[in-house]
């Protein structure tokens, strides 16, 4: 039965992966829960997270020393602090050994690109690189061809429908397809990724769409329900693992209020993700945007206006905008090659409009080095230096009761936090400071004890990929 196999995928994967979490030390006493605000917290000058600046590493790049070397050099020599990696790429393949039986059954394990994943990931973690697992969801040739009952069907032939790349798609209405992709996301979360980005989280858009037959009528209300239904389930399943969730969307979705025919509406999606990543490739804006009909001649304006509009539309949701930007030759207007300044204009347009970083796309992994600033990410030698502690901190890890399934690290002994605006008594800060930080990819938190109130107040500082990275 389709439904039975679906449930089995998630249960088997979740039980296996949760059981592989490292053994935790004895939990410390949980702090008192406090819901009221404390005005004194406003005196703290908390550092702001730097924008995430990323490049994309294809499925084949992960196992190619030459291509991977290009990515690593950018990390070591430039401002790049984020790498997006294919965990299930455009061809439906998974680059490492997977524990998901269906992945092996459909042939998603035919090309293992990385055989020692902990060693592979350690290089990035040691350099404080934020890592994003890209999962191509509904465009899945191996699953659709192995299990046609899960595929979009070509009503002319009765066989799986194919797009202009001759690749088959799975049916976005099918919940077993949802569960397979969520199982892959759960597994990726246990591999050390900081974020899961779902791509092709939409209905197909190119090819003989009129001949595509789905398990339900493809009308806007149903399409939107399918996409948000998947994300809602994914968010629930991933919540114990402490990773952020992102969705890549078409660039025009920030300008249209409908679903653009593919089930994507950014207000819908923002309810279930931490990050929205519109693909603001100038080449894909063939109709331009208001005021700029030829998008490729106005790169800053396109990136700025699109980001600004997206930020405004999802204001108040807590979701941030981090777009994909074009670092490859134009394919829609005049085939021009973008200059370093062209690429820089896109970056600045995003940041000036309130975007929380950017990601460059180049399928050949030939990124324009001259467009990137020479500001390599450097690990902080000591967390006490970052938050100005008067004593070196020695964290220990334990199970976090406020975040089931995760690990936290707490400072064993109390220390004091220095701050020139902080009140002092006898030359010492009035407040003691205890550091609560995440295990590798968990958020950093500052726990402030207020002895006179008999409470502890947890104050979010900022998210970082490792506890010892600035």
Image: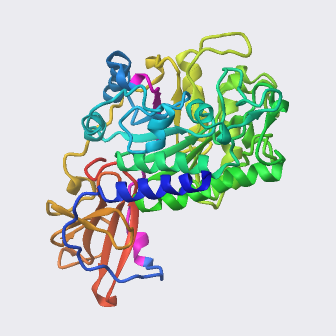
Q: How is the image coloured?
A: rainbow
Residue 249, quarter of picture: top right
User: Measured along the vertical axis of the image, is residue 135 above or below residue 295?
Assistant: below
Residue 291 showing in the rendered view:
no
Asked if residue 46 lies in the magenta stretch, the reply is: yes
Q: Position of residue 375 (x, y in %)?
A: 35, 31
Query: Which is more toward the observer, 66 or 435?
Result: 66
In percent of the image, x 57 and y 18: which residue is there? 328
Residue 455 showing in the rendered view:
yes
Q: Position of residue 329 (x, y in %)?
A: 61, 14
Residue 111, quarter of picture: top left
User: Measured along the vertical axis of the image, is residue 456 above or below residue 276?
Assistant: below
In percent of the image, x 52 and y 29: which residue is there? 360
Q: Position of residue 66 (x, y in %)?
A: 34, 15
Residue 383, quarter of picture: bottom left
| Count of numbered circles on the image | 0
In percent of the image, x 45 and y 27: which residue is there? 59
Query: Which is more toward the observer, 61 or 3?
Result: 3
Asked if residue 171 lies in the magenta stretch, the reply is: no
Q: Position of residue 423 (x, y in %)?
A: 30, 75
Q: Which residues are magenta?
A: 40-61
Query: Which is more toward the observer, 103 or 382?
Result: 103
User: Measured along the vertical axis of the image, is residue 71 above or below residue 185?
Assistant: above
Q: Is residue 175 left or right of residue 401?
A: right
């Amino acid at each position: 039965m389709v439904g039975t196999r679906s449930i089995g995928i998630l249960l088997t994967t979740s039980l296996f992966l949760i059981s592989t979490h490292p053994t935790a030390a004895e939990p410390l006493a949980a702090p008192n829960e406090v819901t009221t605000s404390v005005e004194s917290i406003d005196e703290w000058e908390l550092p702001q997270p730097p924008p995430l600046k990323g490049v994309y590493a294809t499925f084949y790049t992960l196992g190619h020393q030459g291509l991977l070397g290009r990515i690593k050099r950018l990390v070591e020599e430039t401002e790049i602090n984020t790498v997006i990696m294919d965990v299930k790429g455009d061809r439906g393949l998974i680059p490492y050994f997977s524990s998901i039986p269906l992945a092996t059954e459909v042939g998603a394990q035919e090309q293992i690109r990385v055989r020692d994943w902990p060693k592979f990931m350690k290089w990035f973690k040691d350099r404080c690189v934020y890592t994003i697992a890209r999962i191509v969801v509904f465009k899945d040739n191996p699953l659709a061809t192995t299990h046609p009952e899960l595929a979009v069907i070509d009503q002319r032939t009765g066989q799986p429908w194919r797009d202009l790349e001759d690749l088959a798609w799975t049916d976005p209405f099918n919940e077993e397809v949802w569960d397979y992709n969520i199982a892959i996301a759960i597994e990726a979360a246990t591999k050390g990724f900081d974020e899961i980005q779902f791509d092709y989280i939409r209905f197909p858009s190119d090819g003989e769409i009129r001949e595509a037959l789905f398990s339900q009528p493809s009308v806007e209300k149903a399409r939107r329900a399918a996409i948000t239904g998947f994300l809602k389930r994914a968010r629930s399943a991933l919540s114990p693992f402490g990773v952020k969730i992102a969705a890549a969307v078409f660039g025009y979705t920030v300008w249209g209020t409908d679903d653009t025919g593919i089930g994507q509406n950014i207000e819908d999606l923002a309810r279930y993700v931490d990050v929205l990543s519109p693909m603001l490739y100038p080449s894909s804006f063939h109709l331009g945007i208001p005021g700029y009909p030829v998008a490729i001649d106005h790169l800053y304006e396109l990136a700025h206006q699109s980001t600004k509009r997206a930020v405004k539309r999802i204001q108040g949701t807590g979701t941030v905008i981090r777009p994909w930007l074009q670092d490859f030759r134009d394919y829609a207007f005049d085939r021009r090659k973008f200059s370093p300044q062209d690429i820089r204009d896109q970056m600045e347009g995003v940041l000036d409009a309130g975007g929380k970083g950017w990601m460059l796309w180049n399928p050949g992994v030939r990124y324009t080095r001259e467009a990137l600033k020479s500001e390599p990410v450097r690990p902080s030698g000591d967390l006490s230096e970052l938050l100005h502690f008067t004593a070196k901190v020695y964290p220990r890890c334990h199970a976090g009761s406020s975040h089931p399934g995760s690990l936290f690290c707490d400072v064993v002994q109390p220390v004091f936090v220095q701050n020139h605006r902080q009140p002092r008594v006898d030359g010492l800060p009035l407040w003691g400071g205890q550091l609560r930080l995440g295990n590798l990819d968990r958020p950093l938190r500052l726990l402030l004890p207020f002895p006179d109130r008999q409470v502890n107040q947890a104050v979010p500082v900022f998210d970082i990929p490792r506890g010892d990275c600035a």
